[in-house]
Amino acid sequence: MGFLAAGRLVGGCFLIAIGEFQASIGELSRSIGESSHFIGEFPHPIG
């Protein structure tokens, strides 16, 4: 029972970390979109 509780706790922390990671990725892509819109036609390589 202790093992299952620990696994559930680790799983919850993992899901929270994934959620924060996805949120930061979304923030990053949004800021990239804003900066590319701000730059306009200036050629810039992405990826």
Image (cartoon, helix red, strand yellow):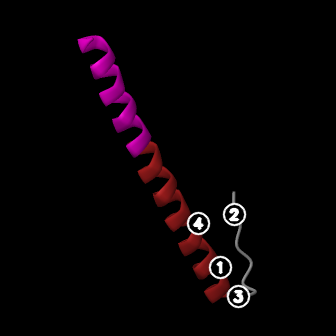
| SS at badge 4 | helix
Assign the N terminus to one quadrant of the image. top left
Mark toward the start of the polypeptide (3 vs 4): 4
Task: Where is residue 23? Give x, y as percent.
Answer: 48, 59
38 sits left or right of 9 in the view: right
State the residue position of label 1.
Answer: 36
Q: Amino acid at mark 4?
A: Ser
Q: Which mark is residue 40?
A: 3
State the residue position of label 2.
Answer: 46
Q: How many residues crowd around disc 3 within 10 Å: few (fewer than 14), some, or many (20 or more)?
A: few
User: In percent of the image, x 46 and y 49: which residue is there?
Assistant: 19
Mark toward the start of the polypeptide (2 vs 4): 4
| SS at badge 1 | helix
Mark toward the start of the polypeptide (3 vs 2): 3
User: In percent of the image, x 42 and y 52: which residue is there?
Assistant: 20
Q: Amino acid at mark 3?
A: Gly
User: In percent of the image, x 46 and y 59: which residue is there?
Assistant: 24
| SS at badge 3 | loop
State the residue position of label 4.
Answer: 29
Mark toward the start of the polypeptide (1 vs 4): 4
34 sits left or right of 16 in the view: right
Q: Residue 15: name its quadrant.
A: top left
Contact between labelled residues 1 and 2, with CB atoms less than 8 Å apart = yes
Q: What residue range appears in magenta? A: 1-16
Q: CA distance from mark 3 to mark 4?
A: 16 Å
Q: Residue 26: name its quadrant.
A: bottom right
